[in-house]
Every structure is written in C-alpha cells, then in structure tokens.
Image (cartoon, rainbow, N blue to C red):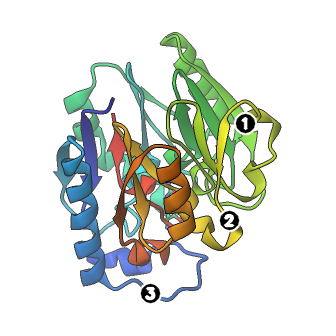
Amino acid sequence: MFKNAIVRKPCPNMVEGITEANLGKPDYHKALLQHARYTGALRKLGLKIQVLEPDNRFPDSVFIEDVAVCTPYCAVITCPGAPSRRDEVSTIRDSIYSFYENVEQITEPGKLDGGDVMMAGTHFYIGLSGRTNKAGANQLIKILQQYNLSGSTVSLGEVLHLKTGISYLEKNNLLVSGEFIEKEEFRDFNKIIVPPEEAYAANCVWINGSVIIPAGYPVTQKNIEEAGYQTITVEMTEFEKLDGGLSCLSLRF
Ligand code: CIR
C-alpha cells in the first residue's frame, strides 16, 4: 500500500522540455489543470500529497519520478541521464529527507532515471536506456541489496524509459506493450496486453487496488477493469507532448 506521494507543479518553462514526440508544444494552462486533476486522483485514492512548487530552472521538473527511486526502506536520489536534468536532483533532496531516514545516491559515471525503475514486490527491474547506464543500474542493485531488496536489468529497444512500456499492477499482473510482451524476464507474470494503437496507455499507476490510466484508451481501460481493478482516467495530452506518462508525474511510497 502507498501512503504518500510527492508531485511538482509544472513550470511555465515546461514548453521547452525535452521531447521526441512531435505533438507540438504543451499548453501550460491546460497542463496545470491536468496536473491538478492528476493530483486529485492520487488524493482520492487515499494518498497524502506533498505538492512542490514549480521550478522554472528545469523545464522537465514536473516529471519528478526521474529524480528519485522510493522503496519501502530507503529512497535513492538518482543521477538523471539527460544533461539538462542532471541538477534537478538538488530540488528533491529536502523533500526526500523529510520522509526518509535512509537516503542513498547514484553517482557518476552512473546514470539512472527513476522512469527506468519498476518495483514489483521486493524486486526492482531496471531498464538500460538512453538515460540509464549499466554503472547506474549496478549502483542501484547494490543499494537495494543492502535493504534486502533485489534488482536486475532489462534491455530496451524502442521506448524512452522502461515504464513507458510496462506497468506493474500488483498481484502478479503486468500491463505490457510492444517489445515487452515476449520478453523472457516477464514470462511468469499474468500479462494484460496493450494494443499497439494504445501504446501510450502502457504507463499507468497502481494505487492501493485501483489503477489510474490516461483518458482515451478504451481497450486498455476495459482490459484492466476485466482484470478486477477500478480505474480512474486522467487527461494527459500536455505531458504526452513531452514524452511523459502518468507514472512520471509522482513519487509514490
Ligand atoms: C524527458 O525527456 O526527460 C521528459 N521530457 C520526459 C520524462 C518522462 N519521464 C518518465 O518517463 N519517467
């Protein structure tokens, strides 16, 4: 069960965020509204939310998931792979220390984005992506082992981050799309398949038995509901324009 979440409001400079999506610039005011509704959904599912103020120095800082990995026993401040995001970690420290006694840190030459880390019980899958390298993944695995947790790496081909294409929905249920459907590492999960035309919906968040999913993906919504979950939909169009999904907008623990 999760009790807390940390989110950061989008900043006006988000329109300069990194993207390969080709969907145009986000509308800042619409993004603020979508972010407020997202936060409302987390709150409705029982989480206590710490809302951090916008930080205009970092256009991508709304994607707070990338700067820390939160486990039940420790938090790990990352070393983000994109140069423009590297110093974003300075903006999360105080917040993380207000929740955690045990705080660890990924250091160079290691690089790691939280979006590449998927927690499934006590095991953490770590995507090796354009943002996360082997050194970063190995550091995280060592840290996890100190807390009786474990980690393993997954190679990625098509997606920005591991969780762009896959989401763990607890009870051994895994929402999977594209390259992850046939991956050996995920053989033993019950798979909920996301059709190619709904690939963006592969990034969902499980919160205490319910699943928040992006609005506009009816097949995936139906498949998740048929697997026994209540769903809440949230409009995500302005964050999708920056290659960001639902999980990127919060740290949950
Ligand atoms: C970036 O490229 O870093 C941002 N525009 C999007 C980050 C999305 N984060 C995530 O998938 N965890």
Extreme residue toward the bottom, this view? 24
| Amino acid at pointer 2 | Pro
Q: Nearer the viewer, mark 2 or mark 3?
A: 2
Left or right of 33: which side holds 85?
right
Percent across and percent down for residue 40 are: 20, 58
- Write the residue at 62% across / 38% down: 110
Q: CA distance from mark 3 to mark 1?
A: 35 Å
Which residue bears the numbered disc 2? 195
Q: Which residue is more in the foreground, 27 or 174?
A: 174
- For the residues carrying marks 3 and 1, which lies nearer the camera in this image? 1
Q: Secondary structure at mark 1?
A: helix
* Quadrant for the C terminus in the image: top left
Q: Which mark is residue 186?
A: 1
Place of residue 174 in the rendered image (x, y in percent of width and height, measured from the top left): 60, 42
Residue 48 position within the rendered picture, expressed as x and y whole percent measured from the top left: 17, 41
Q: CA distance from mark 1 to mark 2?
A: 17 Å
Total numbered badges shown on the rendered structure: 3
Q: Please identify the quarter of the rendering in which residue 111 is found.
A: top right
Q: Identify residue for label 3.
A: 25
Residue 173 is left or right of residue 248, and the answer is right
Dot 2 surroundings within 10 Å: few (below 14), some, or many (20 or more)? some
The label on residue 78 is none
Q: Nearer the viewer, mark 1 or mark 2?
A: 2
Please tell me how crowded label 3 is: few (under 14), some (14-19), or many (20+) other residues with Cα within 10 Å.
some
